[in-house]
Image: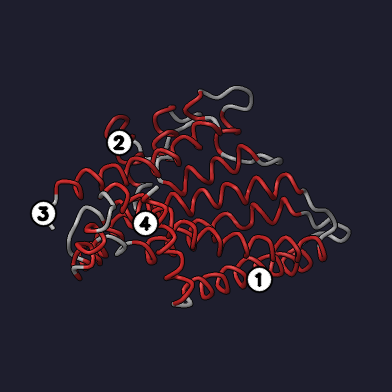
Amino acid sequence: MSWRVVAKKDFRDASRSKALWALTALFVLFMAGMAYVYTLLQESGGAAGTELESVGLLFFLLNPVTLLVPLTALVMAHKSVAGEVESGSAKFLLSLPHTRRDALAGKVAGRGAVLGAAVAVGLVVAAVVTVVMYDSFDAMAYLGFSALTLLLAVAYVAIAVGLSATTKDAGRATVLAAGFFVVFELAWAIVPIGIYYLLNNSFTPTGTPPEWYLLLNRIPPSSAFTNAVFGFLPGNAGTIAQYFPQNPPIYLSKWGALAILLAWAVAVPLVGYRVFDRADL
């Protein structure tokens, strides 16, 4: 299919420009480094004789992963379409037997493969460190965390490409990507708090928060990822488990969190395609 040609070209270009190798080095150092740092923290702050478990490392990685992976994806993919339109190379790309849908899908697949490969290598190296240095290694939990992390990476690449497709200007694409991160990853917590205040004249829910409040808190891609990790990994310590220890509503379950993450990966590129398809290049 035509989108595969675009994807392969993007992946080859990243390999030739050394971008793939730089990203791989970044994630190897990050993942392996965090695995080692966790051992130091446990040794300095933990009780004597406490087992060093890989599941603890996975929860320790949550916050750093939800910062590094989205930022990396946005930086590497936010000009993927707008940059080509601005430079004029999009006209050449579309003069070949590629539709605009093929171009967009190929960009998502190609850049997603670049970031996914770098993240995967980092996770493999960290797994080796964990097997060597830790007392126990839960292979299924580690595979589950790895799959969710790769999904987060691809989802954010899809978001970046979708945003890029809505504009012809690379500078505006940068603003859109930065704005998305600020709104949904840094400032979004204000939204449920603000709505709750308007409804109840109080900033903080007492007791069990309303279900809509909990749902709004998991709307950002990284929050959906975090809730999915808490739901699928053993040793659940997530917010939803505290309020619904048995059977949460489906939209507050681990599957609901996974659906939100998948929805981001589809919805933003779809909006971008709608705009890109009607744009005069």
The relative height of residue 101 versus residue 16 in the rendered view (above or below) is above
Residue picked out by circle 4: 107
Which residue is depicted at the point 34% across and 46% down?
A: 190
What is the spatial separation of the Cα atoms under label 3 and label 4, in whole angstroms? 19 Å
Q: CA distance from mark 1 to mark 4?
A: 31 Å
| Residue type at tag 2 | Ile
Q: Report if the CB atoms under discs 1 and 2 are less than 8 Å apart.
A: no
Quadrant where the image shows the C terminus: bottom left
Which callout, 4 or 2, points to the residue nearer the camera?
A: 4
Q: Give how far across and how far down residue 115 sits, in percent.
A: 49, 61
CA distance separating discs 4 and 2: 37 Å
Asked if labels 4 and 1 touch by Cβ distance under 8 angstroms, the answer is no
Q: Is residue 152 left or right of residue 163?
A: right
Q: Residues within 10 Å of mark 3 (few under 14, many from 20)?
A: few
- Give the foreground label among 1 and 4: 4
Give me the C-alpha separation between circle 3 and circle 1: 47 Å
Q: Which mark is residue 33?
A: 1
Q: CA distance from mark 1 to mark 2?
A: 40 Å
Label located before the other in sequence (2 or 3): 2
Residue at 56% over, 61% down: 117
Residue 79 shown left or right of residue 74 in the figure: left
Which residue is labeled 2 in the image?
Answer: 195
SS for tag 1? helix
Q: Which mark is residue 280?
A: 3
- Distance between the alpha carbons at the discs numbered 2 and 3: 40 Å
For badge 3, the amino acid type reads: Asp
Of labels 1 and 4, earlier in sequence is 1
Q: Considering only vertical position in the picture, is 148 above or below 119?
A: above
Look at label 1 and name its amino acid.
Gly
Q: Position of residue 259 (x, y in %)?
A: 47, 34
Which secondary structure lies at badge 4? Answer: helix
Contact between marks 4 and 2 (CB within 8 A): the answer is: no
